[in-house]
Structures are given as structure tokens and as C-alpha cells.
């Protein structure tokens, strides 16, 4: 969502600034979802924002301090600073394949647009991710409700 917002900004600029060469360039390369420039920029922005969001939401120092405070530890790693460094290292390594996967799923519709020479596609990568996420969460909640009802009947 953040990457899409950043990529819509040049379209806004092109409507404000009446410079034909700039408007043509932005229209061909940045606003056109089937252009290679758009696809590469979109993928790179998704990877960047994945790292950015992860850095904001997960604080390895805080997690390491909480682990130390409550007696938890990672086998082979000293509690405290070493644990925080280890968590940061692992988080960085896990985030890379996750961000590349997110970028691949998000740019897949744009690649399909480019290859099939289709003018418009009603579903973007972000909407596909949201739809699948909601469907999986709904299935998980239904499963837990069915399981809870099964145990209620078993106990009474």
C-alpha cells in the first residue's frame, strides 16, 4: 500500500506541472503499470517498505530485555546485548525472502499486464494479498469456532 502511494505521487505532480516532456515520461514509465520501470520501482519500494515496517514494529533490544527479565534465553547466546544482536541478525535474514515474496506477488499482475498486452486488470497485487489474508483469517476463525463448539458438546 505504501509503495502504491509513493508511485501515485508522480501522477499527481504531472497534473500540477504543465511540462509536456516530464508528463510524457511519467505517463509512459511510472504511471503505466505494465512498464518495466514501474514494475522494478514497485518491487524495490515493496522490499524497502517491508524492511522499514519491520524495523519500526519489532525492537530486538526490547525483546531481548523482556526475555532476560522473565528468565528466557536462546541456547548458545548470552542474554542481553548478544541476544538483541542475534535477533536483529535473524530478523534481517528472515525479512529478505519475505519481502522478495511480497514483491513477487504484488508485481505478478503487472507482469501479466505487460506480457498479455492487456489494458487494465481489476486486481492489483496488493488487493490479492489482502483478499487471501482475509480468507485465511476467516477460515482460521471458523475452524476455532467449530472446534470450540465440538468441545462444548463434549463437556456438557
Image: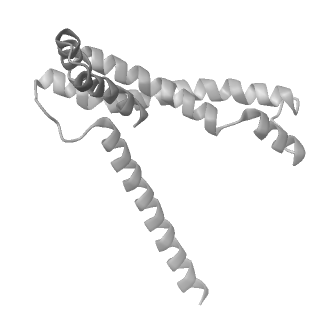
Which residue is farthest top? 21
14 relative position to 99: left or right: left
- Number of on-image labels: 0
Residue 33 visible in rendering: no
Taking 55 as reference, is 76 left or right? right
Q: Quadrant of residue 139?
A: bottom left
Outermost residue on the bottom side: it is 156
Which residue is at 61% across, 85% downward?
155
| Depth check, front residue: 153 or 24 | 24
Q: In what quadrant of the picture does the N terminus appear?
A: top left
Classify residue 73 as left or right of residue 42: right
Q: Residue at x 17, y 12 (%)?
A: 20
Q: Nearer the viewer, residue 38 or 137?
A: 38
Q: Residue at x 75, y 26 (%)?
A: 86
In the rendering, at what x and y percent does residue 104 appear? Answer: 36, 27
Placement of the C terminus among the 4 image quadrants? bottom right
With respect to residue 9, does 137 lie above or below? below
Q: Is residue 33 or residue 25 the one in the foreground?
A: 25
Residue 37: percent from the left, percent from the top? 28, 14
Amino acid at each position: 500500500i505504501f509503495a502504491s502511494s509513493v508511485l501515485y505521487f508522480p501522477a499527481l505532480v504531472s497534473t500540477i506541472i504543465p511540462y509536456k516532456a516530464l508528463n510524457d515520461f511519467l505517463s509512459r514509465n511510472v504511471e503505466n503499470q505494465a512498464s518495466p520501470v514501474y514494475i522494478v520501482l514497485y518491487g524495490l519500494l515493496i522490499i524497502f517498505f517491508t524492511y522499514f515496517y519491520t524495523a519500526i514494529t519489532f525492537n530486538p533490544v526490547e525483546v531481548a530485555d523482556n526475555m532476560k527479565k522473565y528468565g528466557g534465553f536462546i541456547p548458545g547466546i548470552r542474554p542481553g546485548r548478544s541476544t538483541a544482536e542475534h535477533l536483529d541478525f535473524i530478523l534481517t535474514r528472515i525479512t529478505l525472502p519475505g519481502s522478495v515474496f511480497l514483491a513477487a506477488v504484488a508485481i505478478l499482475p503487472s507482469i501479466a499486464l505487460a506480457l498479455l498486452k492487456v489494458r487494465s486488470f481489476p486486481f492489483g497485487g496488493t488487493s490479492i494479498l489482502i483478499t487471501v489474508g482475509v480468507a485465511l483469517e476467516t477460515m482460521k476463525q471458523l475452524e476455532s469456532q467449530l472446534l470450540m463448539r465440538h468441545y462444548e458438546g463434549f463437556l456438557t
